[in-house]
Every structure is written in C-alpha cells, then in structure tokens.
Amino acid sequence: MQPAMNPPRPDTSAPPLRASSFTPRAMIVLSRWRIEVGFVLGSIVLVTANPTRTSIAAGLPVLLAGLGLRGWGRGHLTRRAHLTQSGPYAFVRHPLYVGSFLLGLSFAIMTGIVWLSLLFPLIFTAMYLPKALREEAFLRERYGDEYAAYADRVGRFFPHLRRVPPAFRGAQQFSWERVFGHREQLTWLGALAALGLMWAVASGWIHQLAHYAAAHWPWVA
C-alpha cells in the first residue's frame, strides 16, 4: 500500500502586472484621460493653493531632481532605433515618468496643501501606470526576448537594489542634441512658469494685483 500523496499547493504568487491584465479599450481610456484630469486638478490646485516661501524651499530640491532625471533620460532616449538601456534606463524602465512624478510631487509640496501631497502618488499612479503598461506591451512585441530580459533585470519605477546594472560598454552616450530634439526645454519653461506663479502667490504679488485691479478696474473684480 502506497502512502497518500499530499495534493500540490496552489501557486499564490502574484503574476507581474502587464498590459494583458486590462482590456485594450480600458488601457486606452485610462492612459488618455490623464491630460484632461490633470488640467482640471491643476486648475483647482492653483485656486486653492496657499504656498509659502518655506513650502517652496521644501519642494525645490524635488523639482530639481525631477528635471535632472528627465533631462538625463531624454539625452539617452532614441525612439524606435533600438531599445534604450543606458543612462537612467539602466536603473528603471520609465525614468521620464519617475521624473514627471517628482515634478508633480514638488509642486504638490509647494502648494502647502498637506492632503494633496499625500494624495498625489495615488493620482499619478492612476494616470500614468496604464500608459506605462501600454508602452511595455509595444516594446515586448517589438524587441521580444531582448525586452523580456531587460524587464527582468530592471525595475519599472524603482531600481532593483540587489542587482547592479551592467556597464553597457559601447552603449549610447548622453547627447544634448537628443534632449532638445525631444523638446525637453518646454518642460523646463513650464516648470519655471509654475515656480514663478507659486513665488508670486507666496510673496503676495497676486493679492496686490487683485486689489489694484479691484480699485482701478471695478469691472474686473
């Protein structure tokens, strides 16, 4: 008589999150509505923001880190020519999105609205994760095993701390021409404009302008 065999345990490990986890239509809707929602939320934040010089100083290092990461990534990215794996792409697969997250977080901190800083990571994830998954599906189809190996080695938004990126000798070098070719300067101008607006509110210039307009142009008030 043979001993009873224990039934196999079910595999409870969570599969990696991929675009196949969502329907194609859901992926498209979720990745495109981020612009409209971002515009609405940004308008609300501008009206309710209460920045101070202290809050601006607290968010400024995060802003510079986001701009630096995005610029570094743009200087290495060459779309459709080959799979970019150099520069920040040796550490995370979506450095531009990580940089954009830091930019948004910096301005959330500058507003002085505590709940916004706490809620922003959830809002950003809902807006950008579907887009990242769609891009990964495209790259898997285009580069096949090369992208599969790259995705296994490099984290999506966070680097694998226990895995040291390879040297990538002969890999693409940073190029300012690519930075400007991707029009990253528009991001710099937008960030500078938003920073200037935050400083104007914190310094009281906006309120002074509103009082002046109300006194001299009553129809504006």
Image (cartoon, rainbow, N blue to C red):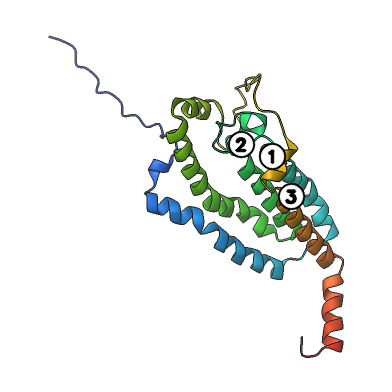
Quadrant into which the N terminus falls = top left
Residue position for label 3? 185
Between 83 and 51, the one nearer to me in the picture: 83
Q: Disc 1 residue type?
A: Arg
Between 61 and 171, the one nearer to me in the picture: 171
Residues under numbered marks 1 and 2 in contact, where contact means CB atoms less than 8 Å apart: yes
Spatial distance from mark 1 to mark 3, Cα to Cα?
11 Å
Crowd around label 3: few <14 · some 14–19 · many ≥20 (10 Å): few
On screen, residue 44 above or below 57 = below
Q: Is mark 3 on a helix, strand or loop?
A: helix
Task: Judge whether residue 91 can be spotted in this image.
Answer: no
Which picture quadrant has residue 8? top left
Q: Residue at x 60, y 29 (%)?
A: 85
Q: Which residue is drawn at 51% across and 30% down?
A: 151
Tell whether 22 sits left or right of 57: left
Q: Is mark 2 on a helix, strand or loop?
A: loop
What label sits on residue 86 in the rendered view? none
Outermost residue toward the top in this view: 1
Q: Residue at x 78, y 56 (%)?
A: 192
Q: Which residue is drawn at 69% across and 58% down?
A: 114
Q: Is mark 1 on a helix, strand or loop?
A: helix
Crowd around label 1: few <14 · some 14–19 · many ≥20 (10 Å): some
On screen, residue 137 above or below 189 = above
Outermost residue toward the left in this view: 1
Residue position for label 2? 78
Residues under numbered marks 2 and 3 in contact, where contact means CB atoms less than 8 Å apart: no
What label sits on residue 178 in the rendered view? 1
Q: Which of marks 1 and 3 is nearer the N terminus?
A: 1
Spatial distance from mark 2 to mark 3, Cα to Cα?
17 Å
**Where residue 210 sits: x, y (%)?**
82, 79
